Amino acid sequence: MSWTEGTVVDRKAWTDRHISLRIEASIGRFQPGQFIRLGLEVDGEIVGRPYSLVNAPDDPLLEVYFDVVPTGPLSPRLAALARGDRLRVGTAAYGFLTLSEMPAGSELWLIASGTGVGPFVSMVSDGGLWRHCDQLRLVHGVRHAAELAYAGRLQALEPPAGKSFAYVPMLSRESSDAALSGRIPAAIDDGRLQLAAGLGFDQARSRVMLCGNPGMVADTMTALAAFGLARHRRREPGQILIEEYWSRPD
């Protein structure tokens, strides 16, 4: 593993457990949806974990958004960093949750739970996304409204002429007139999500990216199977792309 030194430039606490860091560091070129490793020295050894990049590739600062795991060896320490503190940053980005891996389709769904919205913020911040779709829907499911990170930025997104975009927030532990209630898979099953998004699921046109907790990913894939959508693999093309690293422990 090759490391470079990074410096925290800014820190934002969305809640006491949901943190964004902006970091100054030099790394190689990356694609929206990929992740880097961040590390800190703990008891004489570097503890590193993967974190998806939130920033667009042309942003001079790196940005990550993560959930603090209280018993984890790294995330509580990252959350305690302040402006000017230093950390280790992997010099290369990895991952296959990228538009270059997704088969062509006119309708793109980006469906996230929790901090899984991070890589999708990177995608919609990059103008190249619109070469891959005509209609874009971004769904973000969280427990409480305070966890709807980047909502203001996403609500303000304006698609190019001839394209369409909708941001659909969902809350599972409280209600709001500005968000759907319940879990994402259930909202697909009963059609509420499609109604709110103004778009249905179709095997020929729909392409879906999933990022979030393993339960949401598995249950959403099951719900989408009713529409003929299946996981995409290079050796077995489909319509749903997911990121494998999500379930690794902090």
Image (cartoon, rainbow, N blue to C red):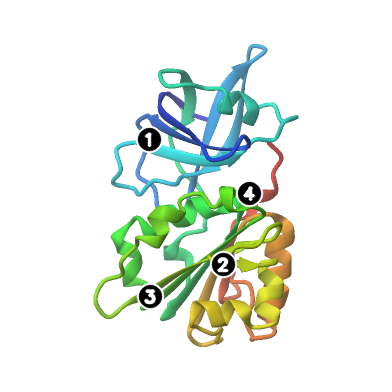
Q: Nearer the viewer, residue 187 or 112?
A: 187
User: What x and y, as percent, mark residue 3?
Assistant: 47, 26
Q: Is residue 27 visible?
A: yes
| Alpha carbon distance from label 3 to label 1 | 29 Å
Q: Earlier in the sequence, mark 3 or mark 1?
A: 1
Q: Which residue is mark 1?
A: 27
90 to the left or right of 220: left
Q: Which residue is mark 4?
A: 245
Under mark 4, the amino acid is Tyr
Residue 99's quadrant in the figure? bottom left
Under mark 1, the amino acid is Ile
* The label number, if any, that marks residue 17 in the structure image: none
**Figure check: 24 above or below 168:** above
Q: Which residue is mark 3?
A: 133
54 to the left or right of 202: left
Under mark 3, the amino acid is Cys
**Figure check: 43 above or below 168:** above
Q: Residue at x 32, y 77 (%)?
A: 163
